[in-house]
Image (tube, rainbow, N blue to C red):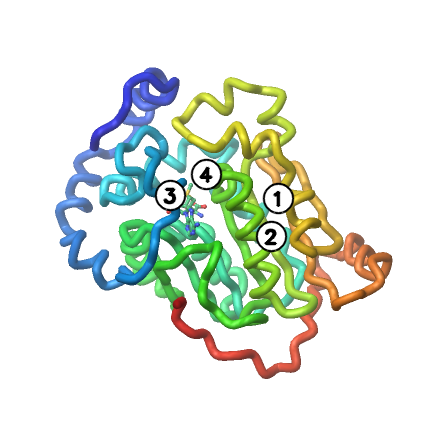
């Protein structure tokens, strides 16, 4: 894997993580898959990659997510870089879910770690994971098969998914927005709004913008081309601008945050919606669907 050597991660953290990772096992996994054939099964040939995605390295890996190395190394590294513990961090998004979802979309699902947790938490729901990297989807699919979870994996762009309006009652994204320029994050939130039915919920787990602003070195640990502009922004404000109501951000283990909101009725009294802020986590709401949800179509 081609990596830059000048990030704090490459100089200090990576050698430590390498000690903890079973590189033989990783190599065995890498060699056990015909990556191009597997990726071709997911690849949507007409998908146009956004410039911010195809022009940058992420985490110091040249070519970003356009190679199998990124997909193979993602989980082994991520388990050590989400303090205090990867599962606890991801659980923050699951715990923020206030609806009883029947159709869930996980945008920028990557290797599917959060997608799998969503399916485990809501086994009756139809769950779709969508990502721009076919290699990440290959790993996600293998993990779901191993766990015996029925999840649909789609190669697509979160800004323009191709699903019909009101296809979902929960749209989630974990660790996506610190990797997208704010204009793209805002456009993903507008697409999420379109995809949700009235009463549907959006839930975004990512770095704590306030903490990142106060602790600049955290934005320099990894090679993350858009993290500083992410830190300077406000997911709260972006959600409000997309039309969401009852927007709420909760700090999660200091370095993370979970932002959630609801799609209101057109012209709905915002005071009525803000009552949703006092949602009891155990008191799940059912979105205002008529029970006749449109079928899930493949993205355009
Ligand atoms: C840091 S990873 C997070 C993966 C996963 N959600 C997780 O929690 O581990 C970011 C992922 O977002 C994907 N991604 C970035 N921009 C995207 C977009 N516009 N549409 C879909 N996926 C995107 C990348 O391919 C990558 O898999």
Query: What separation in Å lies between label 4 and label 1 (alpha carbons)?
Result: 16 Å
Disc nearer the start of the sequence (1/3)? 3
Q: Is residue 141 above or below residue 198?
A: above
Q: Position of residue 196 (x, y in %)?
A: 60, 65
Query: What separation in Å lies between label 4 and label 3 (alpha carbons)?
Result: 13 Å
Circles 2 and 1, Cβ within 8 Å, touching? The answer is yes
Secondary element under disc 2, as helix, strand or loop, is strand
33, 212: nearer the viewer: 212
Where is the N terminus found, in terms of image quarters?
top left
The mark total stands at: 4
Q: Is residue 23 above or below residue 93?
A: above
Disc nearer the start of the sequence (4/3)? 3
Q: Is residue 193 above or below residue 14?
A: below
**Pointer 2: residues within 10 angstroms few (<14), some, or many (20+)?**
many
Q: Would residue 124 appear left or right of 153 to someone viewing this image?
A: right
* Residue that label 1 marks: 258
Query: What separation in Å lies between label 2 and label 3 (alpha carbons)?
Result: 26 Å
Q: Is residue 15 above or below residue 140?
A: above
The quarter holding residue 24 reads top left
Query: What separation in Å lies between label 4 and label 2 (alpha carbons)?
Result: 17 Å
Ligand 1 within 8 A of label 4's CB? yes
**Closer to the camera: disc 4 or disc 2?**
4
Secondary element under disc 4, as helix, strand or loop, is helix
* Residue that label 2 marks: 203
Q: Residue 51 got which mark?
A: 3
Ligand 1 within 8 A of label 1's CB? no
143, 190: nearer the viewer: 190
Disc nearer the start of the sequence (2/1)? 2
Ligand 1 within 8 A of label 2's CB? no
Query: What separation in Å lies between label 2 and label 1 (alpha carbons)?
Result: 7 Å
Q: Residue 179 got which mark?
A: 4
């Amino acid at each position: 894997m081609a990596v830059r050597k000048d990030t704090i991660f490459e100089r200090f953290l990576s050698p430590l993580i390498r000690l903890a990772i079973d590189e033989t096992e990783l190599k065995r996994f890498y060699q056990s898959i015909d990556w191009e054939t597997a990726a071709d099964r997911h690849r949507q040939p007409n998908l146009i990659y956004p410039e911010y995605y195809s022009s940058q390295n992420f985490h110091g890996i040249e070519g970003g997510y356009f190679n199998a190395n990124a997909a193979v190394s993602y989980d082994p590294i991520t388990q050590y870089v989400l303090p205090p513990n990867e599962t606890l961090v991801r659980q923050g998004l699951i715990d923020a879910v206030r609806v009883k979802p029947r159709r869930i979309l996980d945008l920028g699902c990557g290797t599917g770690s959060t997608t799998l947790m969503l399916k485990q938490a809501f086994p009756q729901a139809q769950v779709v994971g969508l990502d721009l990297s076919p290699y990440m989807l290959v790993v996600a699919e293998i993990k779901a098969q191993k766990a015996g979870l029925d999840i649909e994996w789609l190669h697509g762009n979160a800004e323009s998914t191709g699903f019909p309006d009101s296809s979902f009652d929960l749209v989630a994204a974990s660790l996506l927005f610190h990797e997208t320029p704010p204009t793209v994050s805002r456009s993903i939130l507008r697409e999420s709004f379109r995809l949700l039915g009235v009463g549907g919920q959006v839930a975004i787990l990512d770095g704590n913008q306030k903490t990142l602003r106060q602790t600049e070195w955290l934005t320099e640990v990894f090679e993350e081309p858009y993290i500083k502009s992410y830190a300077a922004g406000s997911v709260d404000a972006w959600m409000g601008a997309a039309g969401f109501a009852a927007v709420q951000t909760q700090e999660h283990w200091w370095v993370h945050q979970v932002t959630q909101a609801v799609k209101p009725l057109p012209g709905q009294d915002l005071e009525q919606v803000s009552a949703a802020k006092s949602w009891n986590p155990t008191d799940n709401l059912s979105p205002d669907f008529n029970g006749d949800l449109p079928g899930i179509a493949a993205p355009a």
